[in-house]
Image: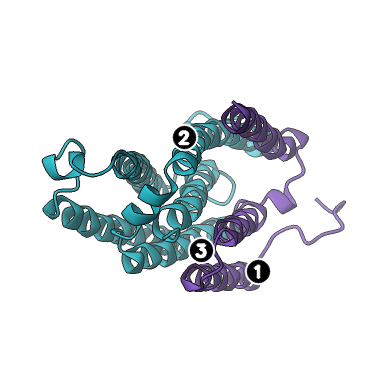
């Protein structure tokens, strides 16, 4: 228990800070959608969704405080697997 | 989790790993649907653009805030439980369930409005639209519907957790059921975080 450098358990302050960030990012994403930035819009919207997910995973789902290797590597594995699916699908679609 | 105990840290670790593995399969399930969405969108940009304008940006945004808030209260429920304050934990679980119900209510009104405008699977009006728009609404109903089922399941698990808390089967030393319910709930939130911009904001 005592061998961690980081704070072991997040408290109210952390949770509310993450919550504020999530609400703020939602506001940004809704605002950005009404700007006329063309093709860039989808990239902005996805980047914000990715950031929000990382916040939820790290703090609400406690991955930042996770010490079990198995749990730590699961998300990277899933993300890489999905990236392979998406990448291969798009090489087919774009260069057919 | 079950009554006969070799409780303690080992049991707790195993329980959470099972939920994490399940969460991975869920991400791949929805990931496949998102891939399908992106390919169809790539092939029918104009139709997706037009169809997305029929969705209510207001209710989408409202539901996003509702779900994020429910994630906060779920996280606080686990926090309170680990600190040994079961009564406050129960309050936060109730809040989470009520917010989930709010989400479903908003979603219900939204779907009802679509149905009234002849937008539901196999409706004559929907079938008269261009193919890309039919695809958009097919994906919209499939993905938000599957997500809504997850919301209902999550409420059920939280309800079960409440009962176990009341019966004293869950406490600071045995929080796995509530922890797992919460992990699942955050996953439901993460999925919506992607559903919302892709369906409601792309127009």
**Residue B81: which disc?**
none
In the displayed structure image, the side of residue A83 where residue B131 appears, left or right: left
CA–CA distance between discs 2 and 1? Answer: 36 Å
| Tag 1 residue | A14
Residue plotted at (51% across, 63% down): B72
In the displayed structure image, the side of residue B162 where residue A74 appears, left or right: right
Q: Picture coordinates of residue A23 (x, y %)?
A: 52, 71
A5 in relation to B27, above or below: below
Q: Are marks 3 and 1 on the same chain?
A: no
In what element is the residue under mark 3? helix
Residue plotted at (56% across, 68% down): A37
How many callouts does the rendering have?
3
Residue plotted at (15% across, 50% down): B115
| Tag 2 residue | B36
In the displayed structure image, the side of residue A50 where residue A3 appears, left or right: right
Please report whichever mark, 3 or 2, sits nearer to the chain's N-terminal start: 2
Q: Picture coordinates of residue A65 (x, y %)?
A: 73, 52
Chain designation of label 3: B
| Tag 3 residue | B72
In what element is the residue under mark 2? helix
């Amino acid at each position: 228990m005592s061998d961690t450098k980081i704070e072991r358990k997040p408290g109210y302050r952390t949770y509310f800070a993450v919550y504020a960030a999530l609400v703020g990012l939602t506001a940004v994403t809704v605002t950005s959608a009404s700007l006329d930035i063309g093709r860039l819009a989808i990239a902005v919207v996805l980047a914000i969704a990715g950031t929000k997910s990382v916040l939820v995973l790290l703090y609400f789902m406690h991955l930042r405080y996770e010490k079990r290797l198995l749990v730590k590597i699961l998300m990277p594995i899933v993300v890489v697997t999905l990236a392979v699916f998406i990448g291969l699908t798009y090489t087919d679609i774009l260069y057919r | 989790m079950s009554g006969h105990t070799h409780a303690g840290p080992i049991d707790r670790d195993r329980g959470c790993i099972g939920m994490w593995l399940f969460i991975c399969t869920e991400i791949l399930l929805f990931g496949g649907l998102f891939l399908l969405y992106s390919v169809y969108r790539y092939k029918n940009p104009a139709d997706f653009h037009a169809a997305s304008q029929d969705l209510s940006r207001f209710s989408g945004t409202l539901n996003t805030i509702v779900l994020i808030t429910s994630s906060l209260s779920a996280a606080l429920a686990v926090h309170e439980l680990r600190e040994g304050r079961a009564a406050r934990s129960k309050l936060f679980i109730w809040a989470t369930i009520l917010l989930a119900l709010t989400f479903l209510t908003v979603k219900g009104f939204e779907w009802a409005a679509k149905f009234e405008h002849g937008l539901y699977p196999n409706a004559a009006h929907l079938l008269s639209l261009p193919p890309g728009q039919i695809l958009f609404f097919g994906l919209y109903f499939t993905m938000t519907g599957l997500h809504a089922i997850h919301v209902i399941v999550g409420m059920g698990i939280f309800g079960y957790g409440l009962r176990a808390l009341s019966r004293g089967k869950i406490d600071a030393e045995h929080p796995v059921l509530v922890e797992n319910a919460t992990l699942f709930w955050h996953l439901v939130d993460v999925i919506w975080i992607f559903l919302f911009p892709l369906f409601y904001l792309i127009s």
